[in-house]
Each structure stands twice: as structure tokens, then as C-alpha cells.
Amino acid sequence: MAIRDTLKANLDVALASSNVSVSSELPYNSGGEPLYFKNMKYLYLDEDNIEKTELFNNLDNNDVIQTETGVTGYLSVDAKNPPGDIDTIVSDIITSRLAVTGQPTRDCEMTTEIDADRLLYTFNFNFITFN
């Protein structure tokens, strides 16, 4: 199962009682504008971005490979009237990284920016495993 799918399943449950929904669509542009700007209060998760790095090349062909998987999430809300429970929503989104098991490193960094009258939250999930 893809990490994006695991995050989405966990977020569907975690945000069920909030003002925010999780979209099954990818954060594509529509009419030159990202969907997360057109549809505020929807969390959009991008596809898994996977990078593999060979750490150790062993003589017995049991090489050690680091697999880093990144997933970016986008949530926009009205900057003037954000949901009253936005702090809880942000916390639940960041905590959803713990639902992904089997990954020694499970990080999430959040940034915010204001564009026109929208407040955009960007969540950069990063998962690292060694094979």
C-alpha cells in the first residue's frame, strides 16, 4: 500500500468531525489555479515521491539501500475567517505521520503562507527506511 493511501485513510478518520475534508483527487491545476485554492477546507495529498540511495555496496550483493518517500499535503482556508478548530486540524494532520508503520523516520514539516485572502498550509511528510 502506498504511503499516500495510508495517510489518507488515517486522515479521513482523524478529520471526520472537523470542518476539513480529505480529497481523493491530486492537487492538480484547474483553470490555471490549484484545486486547493479553488476548494478551500479540503486537504489534498500529492503522490508518493520516492528516492532510493545506495548506502553500502556489499560483496555478497546484500546492498544497503535507503528509501526516502515524500508526500506533500495542501490545505487552504479563508485567512480572515479560519475554522475555529484549525489548531486541532493542523495537529491531527501532523500526527497522521505516525499511522505509517515500518518507517524508522517519520517526519512532517509544516509551512504557512498567505496568498490574497487564503491561508495556505503546506505539509511535507518525509519517511525513510533502509533495506
Image: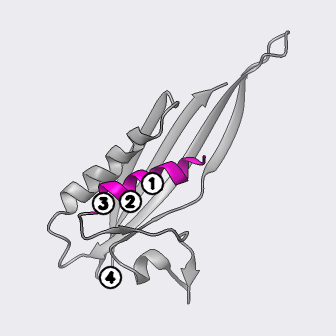
Residue 120, compared with residue 110, is above or below; it is below
* Disc 3 and disc 4 in contact, CB within 8 angstroms: no
Task: Tell me: 116 left or right of 53.
Answer: left
SS for tag 3? loop
* Disc 4 and disc 1 in contact, CB within 8 angstroms: no
Q: Is residue 98 magenta?
A: no
Residue at screen point 36% across, 52% down? 110
Q: Earlier in the sequence, mark 4 or mark 2?
A: 2
Span colored in magenta: 1-16
SS for tag 2? helix
Q: Tell me the quadrant of the picture where the C terminus can be found.
A: top right
SS for tag 4? loop
Q: Which mark is residue 15?
A: 3
* Amino acid type for the residue under numbered disc 2: Asp
Q: CA distance from mark 1 to mark 3?
A: 10 Å
Q: CA distance from mark 4 to mark 2?
A: 28 Å
Q: Earlier in the sequence, mark 1 or mark 3?
A: 1
Residue at screen point 53% across, 53% down? 5
Q: Which mark is residue 116?
A: 4
* Disc 3 and disc 2 in contact, CB within 8 angstroms: yes
Q: Which mark is residue 9?
A: 1
Q: Residue 58, located in which quarter of the rendered image?
A: top right
Q: Count up the numbered dots.
A: 4
Picture coordinates of residue 16, whole percent (x, y): 29, 63
Q: Main secondary structure of the magenta part?
A: helix
Q: Residues within 10 Å of mark 1 (few under 14, many from 20)?
A: some
Q: Residue 59, located in which quarter of the rendered image?
A: top right
Q: How is the image coloured?
A: one colour
In this figure, which residue is indicated by the disc labeled 2? Answer: 12
Q: Residues within 10 Å of mark 2 (few under 14, many from 20)?
A: some
Q: Residues within 10 Å of mark 4 (few under 14, many from 20)?
A: few
